[in-house]
Image: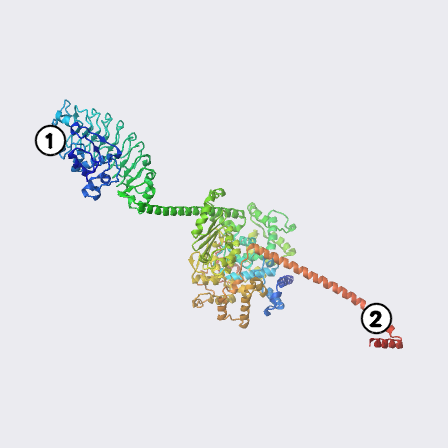
Amino acid sequence: MIPGKYRSVSGRATNNVNCGLHLVIQTSSLPEKNKVEFKLNKETSSFPGRLLQHDLERNYSSRQGDGRVISPSPRNKSSCISSTTNVTELCGLEMKTAMSSLSAFGDSSTQTPSKSRMRQGCHSAGPNVSGDHINLVSSSMPSFPILQRSSEEKILYSDRLTLERQKLTVCPIIDGEEHLRLLNFQHNFITRIQNISNLQRLIFLDLYDNQIEEISGLSTLRSLRVLLLGKNRIRKISNLENLKNLDVLDLHGNQITKVENVNHLCDLRVLNLARNLLSHVDNLNGLDSLTELNLRHNQITSVRDVDNLPCLQRLFLSFNNISSFENVSCLADSSSLSDITFDGNPIAQESWYKHTILQNMMQLRQLDMKRVTEEERRMASVVAKKEEEKKRESHKQSLLKEKKRLTINNVARKWDLQQNRGANIPTNQDRKDSDSPSQDPCPIDGSTISAFPEETGSLDSGLISALQGLSVTDTHLVEVDGDTLSLYGSGALESLDRNWSVQTAGMVTTVSFSFIEFDEIVQVLPKLKIKFPNSLHLKFKETNLVMLQQFNALAQLRRVDQLTVDPQGNPVVNFTLWKYYVLFRLSHFSMQKINGTEVTQNDMIMAERLFGILAHVASSELPQYRMISILGDTRKKQFQYLLETKGKKPGITSEENNDSKRLTGENTNRATLNYTTRDFYNEKLEEIKEKKKFCKMYIEDLVKEATEINMKNEALQKLWPQMFIELVRDAVIEIRNKNSYMKLCLQQITDQK
Amino acid sequence: MATEKDGNLGSGSRGVGAQKVCLPKDAESGALSPAGLRVSGFNSVCQGTHILFREFSFIQATPHNRASFLRAFWRCFRTVGKNGDLLTMKEYHCLLQLLCPDFPLELTQKAARIVLMDDAMDCLMSFSDFLFAFQIQFYYSEFLESVAAIYQDLLSGKNPNTVIVPTSSSGQHRQRPALGEASMLEGVEASLFYQCLENLCDRHKYSCPPPALVKEVLSNVQRLTFYGFLVALSKHHGINQALGALPDKGDLMHDPAMDEELERLLVQVPGLVNSVSASPEASCLPSRTPPRVASPWRPLHHSRKVDAESDGSTEETDESET
């Protein structure tokens, strides 16, 4: 277990190994020289990294005997400095380790103070453990004890002084020790750093476990490289301005709430802020050499600025309050970070935790003390890719949704314009008030919509794969969502001409029309019937349904189970009778629901009571010639059948007759109630006019002809007697000479033979 | 009357003639020989069913056609009135359009104005109120336009007898409210008005109500307004009888033959259980037990008919103008 490169000459120092001391203090091979050298370079050590890192808050794990503590990792490149901190921290918490850490400085034994002679000159000084090595003498200034060492001591350990567990409440005045490089005040009760400003060669100052409330009195210690202030009462990081060479700063176990006044520490390599009261971490720029940052056991929710630390390799964020990766997203930008811990944070509980971290921090080698394997990395990237895709998809979806919203708004606005233009048509007056929601000023105009063209291309491809046919343009919108086909704007009706896949067409059971004139819808109903044979539910919103007779048009469909007519833009819904009329006119569909309410038997009876006579009158009293012209060819057979049965059983409409009527679908007596759109109706009127005109002309021609014939006839009648007389006279003259006439006749007969 | 009859027969045959053109292909089906068709056509003219679903120009062409249309409307939608529903002008218009797809909204509006006195066109009207007002407005529409012009002239103090029959109805609506405010004494003097009307009836080429009845209406009052006159006309049962299209107000909901037919139809309602046929009375609707309140004004005009079967109309708009 002894690290091979451990070069401490002092045999006693070997004890330290199990503490994982990385700070190599190379006392020269000759202890007499008392030369202490700090090797504070990164590459020094090949020490058991596991041990070190892991031991940042070491006490616990070592007590718990965590196996990892001991196993050294040859790959570890952690710098020796870090180990120092670790060790020091460790010391504070456990006596034994503390002792060993001290031994790192050359003369350690478990009985640290034994070699220093202290003369107790102050009441505040505790019992002098070793008695005669160190003398604390009351100085002329009564409050400060004065420390004096025997010259022998001085010679032996000229550069270090350990005043551990001396129950000091103040720093003693240290006289004649200007060469001191290492000063240890661990485990005292010091409240203020004093009386050391003359120790200008001091490199190592350990004030672990005291009661210091403010960092002060250090401004002259320009060569200080290691400052250990763990387990004190410091509230604020301050007064470090002159410590430009600081290499290790340990402030763990204080009450610091904010990272500040450290930006000038460009040589700092280790900063320990564990067990403080930090909630946000930032203001880290300038720490250009920082390789290790310990932030465990704070209340951190967000970390920033880490990407400004070019050398940071290890970051410990365990046991904080980080709940999302966004709050620490700067970590992803750090290229040097290789080791990070998040355990004990809310974020570590999330299912996406590991792969998110790994995906965002490709450079990571260790996460929560565990090596990141290739497999994990691959998994993470796969998951991340998937997530990315999902995100893109949802982005696409939301984009689509937005676009859809825009288009619908646009269609609605156009519709409103159209309606207002025709507002002098009194039937539209109702709409204005009912319309207000759709008239919301929407700032979208053509330009905004056309701002999307790039997306549209990519959207369409993604769409088809998503089994959601959707074509979006400015003036209309067609959407298939599950079993619902939604059409917005009259242009959307053209989509019925498209080739819909059998599957899609078969799935559609609900067809919804918005912002389309009902008369236009009527014209496509036959197409609808063919293309979407399963449509059962029709929805109308803003379709200008104003008359009951318009519902007649729906009778031509194959099936309608449900009808929803939104009051918005459909004044007909305000009528008390509309529902009954629908039920009556579409009774052959056996409708289930109208506007969401179940159709009851009472409704059916009511409908029949209200309008039954109309149907009866329409069918039985309409003259036959009218009936035929109204019904057209398709219904003729049906009608004839009706006529025949009526003829056979006059007066009684038998049950079978009713049955057969029902079987044929739509009741014939209702068929006469049909709807023709206004344009078509006008056309029809025109046609009738034309026909009348033609008839008139035809008759007039006939009359003219007849008159002429008659006139000729009359003329003939007048001429005839005269002509007759002439004829008779000619005949008489011819037969006057009987013989010659006979001869002539005989001659003719013979000639013929 | 005889001339009118001739006219409408002519109109009927013209209609048949027009249809005949497209008939030849139907001729082979025995029931529909041209002669048979012609007979049925003439029959329908006699019965007044020839106007069903015809265009408006045809329906209003002759007085007979108009009367037939009124009767058809009453017969088809009597049940709506019987049910007690109060409807808006627009809804009545829709019902009219069920029988005549291009029925103009203007006529319906005018009829509603008679009932509602022009104040709130979206108010609900009872079926009978609307029907009688509509009858006057539709049957005598040309006459009423002339009357409106005369009334205007009287209001403005012109000599009525030189009045030329106007054709524009829109101008009349524009002026009327303003003039109504202007005159302190509302309306015109009845006797003077009657003289003008009598004069008008003499030379009017369209049908007009019998002068005797008009006199009767006008003799009851000193002064009256134009709409007061129309309301009085529409509620006068004599005029209704003279017109002959609708039954008396008391009998308005009564049409036993049709009720019988309706019962028969109800039995056929798809998916219906027999309970319907068990309903005791044809006229009693299941969903409503009509609160038959005798209207306050009806006894005045129809004292002989205290109808147990009123339409339940609310007489909110009926001020007896007499």
Instruction: Give the mark nearest the N terminus, 2 or 1.
Output: 1
Q: Secondary structure at mark 2?
A: helix
SS state under label 1: loop
Position of residue A662 relative to residue A577, above or below, is below
Q: Which residue is mark 1?
A: A130
Question: Can you tell which mark lies on residue A469?
Answer: none
Figure check: A550 above or below A330: below
Residue A596: where, in percent of width, then height?
Answer: 42, 56
Apparent side of residue A539 relative to residue B48 in the rendered image (left or right): left
The amino acid type found where label 2 is placed reads Leu
Between A52 and A446, the one nearer to me in the picture: A52
Query: Visible in this render: residue A241?
Result: yes
Q: Which chain is indicated by disc 1?
A: A
Residue A441 seen anywhere in this rendered image of the structure: no
- Which residue is denoted by mark 2 in the rendering? A727
Is B65 on the left-hand or right-hand side of A210? right
How far is mark 2 from mark 1, CA to CA?
A: 185 Å
Give the x, y percent position of residue A541: 47, 52
Q: Nearer the viewer, residue A324 or A174?
A: A174
